[in-house]
Amino acid sequence: MEWGPPRGARVAPLLWIVAGLALPAGLLSLLLVGAAPAGRGLAVEIAAGLGYVALGLLALQLALGARARWIVDAVGLDTVLLFHRQVGLWTAAFAAAHVVLLAFAEPWYVAHLLDLRADAPRALALALALMGLLLLVLVPRQLTRLRIPYEAWRVGHGLLAVTVVGVALWHALALGRSSATPEEQAAMTALVAAPLAVLLGSHLLRPLSALRRPWRVAEVRLERDRVWTLVLEAVGHDGLRFHPGQAVWLTLGRSPLSPRQHPFTVASSAAAPRRVELTIKELGDFTRSIGRTPVGTRAYLAGPYGTSALDLRAPRPLVCVAGGLGVTPMMSMLRTLRDRDDRRPALLVYAAGALDKIVFGPELDELARALDLRVVYVLESPPPGWTGERGLIGGELLDRHLTARYEGAEVFVCGPEPMMNLVERALRDRGVPGARVHAEHFTLVGSRPPGRRSLREQRIRALAAGAAALLLAAVLLVGAVRAAPASSTGPGGASALHAPPAARLSGLAPPGGAQGANRTRPKRRARWKFPSPRMGDHAVPPLFSMA
């Protein structure tokens, strides 16, 4: 086994983010294929571009939600989740701008597409897709407040996302001019189908392959009040090859396809791959009964995941800062060092609410004797006579313990979000290079915990905003290029920009137009003559590509 960090961890995350933008950019480039329809103004062309970018971003969301190993190992699971949230917001913004701009430029057209009497299935599909997009963005942020079970949300979120993507692709293929030729249809379908294939492979094929690598619950051990350790043994295979500090997704039961799949950091030694220990605290619906798991229960593990892993090939000093149950990845590192007889200088700063809240206390004392390890406990509510550290882990506390013997150390931080943010900022202020500070934030869904945003979250938000700005600039450029021919003079010396809507859109004219102003108002169904989306240069522009 290669004892270094995951190979993908050495790839610059920015390169992977840029690669992800190739999907919406590829769909946008389809608008440059072939001649633009005559007479379509700049606003309509920009609206079309916004729709294609929104469709591409939504397809990208499927790939991010798949938790594919080659993506997660490149940038880290927390980065993928943070980027997934930010892309979701920008996707909704592009889709909303697409609808609003098109409604402003041609309100009669949007009204017709959403008219139940004109085409009820189409109108319902588009309306439901718009509502689905809104739910995809808003519900995860209020999951805790709404008290929706995690498993129900996970299944519903996935099915709703696939449905919205399907409606968006159907809309673009049925109404968008860029899909007029079979080649353009195939290109658009392939670009959207690729992330869908990644999603299906991750959530269907990969779990099915886990049937050949089952695990068995060998022991359920109480560590502290409401904190349990599940000991899993490999059944008929060589176990799990992982790096100290990585996490897995656990499924208990006979089928790996169960939606009750949850992430936990491995706490055991990487030198014992056939025996994996997961230390879990009773918190949510799934973990509340974790201590009552019967011995012998079948289990499946997906992973390992995470880039916050200890490099055992380089004997640099190790500094761990943990809060609460965030000590579990540090336990994996220290247990692995013990099993490998690795005597590098190590420091563990461990914050807990009280003395009786410390997990693994006796074992940490043993590890301190077996290794070159110093353990510093920091208690929020210390008992009388306590002479150790107290309060929060801040810069002054770190100054007292980060002595010269830990110079050049790899620093790992794990714990509650506010603590991690405080420690990361203190390390940055003291000149510790960001490349040597490893911290993964696993706030999956629900409201963000109180406290300032982490440095990584700030960077991801800035990257997502920058990427959105680049895509918007590309949309404006493509729209200008496509609208440019409309300024030329058409047959008879009339400018195409000033041609009536019926001439511009080949029969699809707004009610009450110039030619119909002096006529008796026709019945509603007679107002619209909707041309086929493949009627040459006068095809109908796309309305909506959801995110």
Image (cartoon, rainbow, N blue to C red):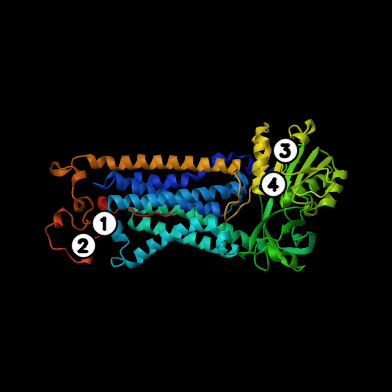
Identified by mark 1, the residue type is Trp
> To which quarter of the image does residue 347 belong?
top right
Label 4 CA crowd tier, 10 Å (few <14, some 14–19, many 20+): many
Residue 454 locus on image (x, y percent) = 60, 43
Q: Nearer the viewer, mark 4 or mark 3?
A: 4
Identified by mark 4, the residue type is Cys
User: How many badges with numbers are in the image?
Assistant: 4
Where disc 1 sits, the SS reads: helix
Kindly identify which numbered label has been placed on residue 414. 4
Residue 20 locus on image (x, y percent) = 50, 45
Q: Earlier in the sequence, mark 2 or mark 4?
A: 4
Identified by mark 2, the residue type is Arg
Direction front: furthest residue = 384
Which of 511 and 69 lies nearest the eye of the viewer?
511
Residue plotted at (52% across, 40% down): 462
Kindly identify which numbered label has been placed on residue 108. 1
Q: Which residue is mark 3?
A: 410
Q: Are marks 2 and 3 in contact (CB under 8 Å)?
A: no
Where disc 2 sits, the SS reads: helix
Label 2 CA crowd tier, 10 Å (few <14, some 14–19, many 20+): some
Residue plotted at (21% across, 56% down): 507
Q: Nearer the viewer, mark 2 or mark 4?
A: 4
Which of 277 and 407 lies nearest the eye of the viewer?
407
Q: Earlier in the sequence, mark 1 or mark 4?
A: 1
Q: Earlier in the sequence, mark 2 or mark 3?
A: 3
Where disc 4 sits, the SS reads: strand
Q: Which residue is mark 2?
A: 527
Name the side, left or right, on which 442 lies relative to 321: left
Name the side, left or right, on which 170 lies relative to 408: left
Name the side, left or right, on which 285 lies relative to 379: left
